[in-house]
Image (cartoon, rainbow, N blue to C red):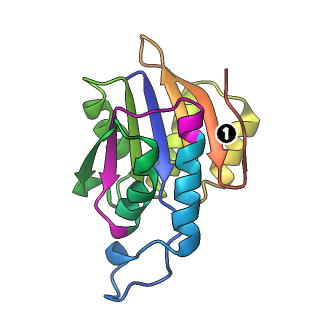
């Protein structure tokens, strides 16, 4: 894996018709923000080869909004990404990245936020970026990392629906 893109699902409705968290759908704002974030990432050339998607309704809907911007990506829906911790997300991405260059994970907090902070720390990102990612990783946020030949992460962008912290290069 040369690049990892972490994309948090869009803004979801507070409750589902079933009462189950797993079934919560995206709010209208979530659909719009997910599509807008995908368009931004694609415009910057962040094009995944494979996308790992939690099977929760809100992550599937986030991918449905994002998918038109990544027409060559292959999506894999993975049950274990629902409520996954940072280690599980990283392991799933590494496994998928064994045969492709760019992996995107569409998932949930706190796992995605914790992984973003961990990768920023491992990659010696500026303290201001680590602090910002620690404070917030809102819905439809994305974090992008490049990996060198030794597997060390390097910050390549932290993007929020309302502004971003730009690219690292």
Residue drawn 67% across the image and 30% down it: 167
- Circle 1 — which element? helix
Categorize mark 1 by other alpha carbons within 10 Å: few (<14), some (14-19), many (20+): some
The C terminus lies in which quarter of the figure?
A: top right
Q: Is residue 24 visible?
A: yes
The N terminus lies in which quarter of the figure?
A: top left
Task: Check disc 1 and report the residue beneath it.
Answer: 130
Please say if 120 is above or below 24. above
Residue drawn 51% across the image and 23% down it: 146
User: In the image, is residue 55 part of the stretch drawn in magenta?
Assistant: yes
Q: Name the foreground residue: 114 vs 100.
A: 100
Residue drawn 38% across the image and 34% down it: 103
* Left or right of 20, for residue 140: right
Q: Percent x, y for residue 59?
A: 39, 61
* Left or right of 2, for residue 116: right
Q: Is residue 139 visible?
A: no
User: In the image, is residue 23 part of the stretch drawn in magenta?
Assistant: no
Q: What range is drawn magenta here?
A: 41-57
Q: Percent x, y for residue 124?
A: 63, 24
Q: Percent x, y for residue 43?
A: 59, 35
Tell which residue pokes out farthest to the top in this image. Answer: 149
Please say if 21 is above or below 6. below
Q: Percent x, y for residue 42?
A: 53, 37
């Amino acid at each position: 894996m040369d690049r990892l893109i972490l994309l948090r699902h869009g803004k979801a409705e507070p409750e589902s018709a079933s009462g189950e968290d797993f079934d919560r759908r995206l709010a209208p704002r979530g659909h719009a923000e997910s599509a807008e974030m995908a368009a931004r990432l694609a415009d910057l050339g962040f094009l995944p080869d494979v996308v790992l998607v939690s099977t929760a309704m809100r992550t599937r809907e986030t991918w449905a909004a994002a998918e038109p911007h990544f027409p060559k990506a292959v999506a894999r829906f993975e049950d274990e990404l629902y409520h996954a911790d940072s280690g599980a997300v990283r392991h799933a991405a590494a496994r998928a990245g064994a045969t492709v260059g760019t992996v995107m994970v569409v998932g949930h907090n706190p796992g995605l936020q914790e992984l973003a902070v961990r990768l920023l720390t491992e990659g010696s990102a500026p303290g201001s970026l680590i602090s910002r990612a620690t404070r917030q990783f809102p819905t439809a946020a994305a974090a992008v990392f490049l990996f060198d030949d030794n597997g060390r992460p390097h910050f390549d962008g932290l993007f929020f629906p309302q502004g971003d912290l730009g690219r690292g290069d």
